[in-house]
Image (cartoon, rainbow, N blue to C red):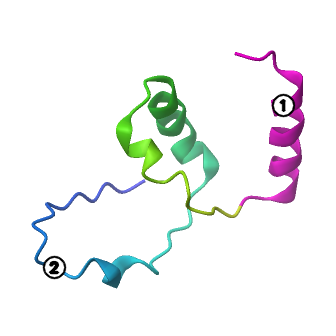
Amino acid sequence: MQHRLRIFTGEEETLEQKDSLVNVRFGEIADALAEAVYYRRTWISDFSEDEVKIPSDLYAILAAYSHLRPGA
């Protein structure tokens, strides 16, 4: 996974990158996502309303897992 950070000054047009998509393997981002959720990183909530495309079999596993695990 390539890291690309930019400093936001408020002067640039932010809509230019809205449509850019990147294909990555789930394994490339799984650890980073798990750590961000575990430590309640603020940036993870910035994406809470974004839609993601995942394979239907992964969705089925996640849905089953969410019903089987004990409540917090």
Q: Which residue matches tag 1?
A: 65
Lower sequence index among marks 1 and 2: 2
* Residue at left offset 61%, top offset 54%: 25
Look at the image and give the residue range highlighted in magenta. 54-72
Packing grade of label 1 (10 A; few <14, some 14-19, many >=20) is: few
Instruction: Please state the horizontal and vertical placement of residue 56, each as a whole percent of the image.
Output: 86, 58
Q: Is residue 63 above or below residue 59?
A: above
Q: Secondary structure at mark 1?
A: helix
Whether the magenta-drawn stretch holds residue 69 is answered as yes
Instruction: Please state the horizontal and vertical placement of residue 61, each as a whole percent of the image.
Output: 86, 40
Q: Is residue 9 above or below residue 59?
A: below
Q: Quadrant of residue 6?
A: bottom left
Amino acid type for the residue under numbered disc 2? Glu
* Residue at left offset 43%, top offset 53%: 1
Instruction: Please state the horizontal and vertical placement of residue 48, each as a whole percent of the image.
Output: 54, 51
Q: Nearer the viewer, residue 42 or 21?
A: 42
- Return the mark for residue 12: 2
* Residue at left offset 62%, top offset 49%: 26
Q: Secondary structure at mark 2?
A: loop
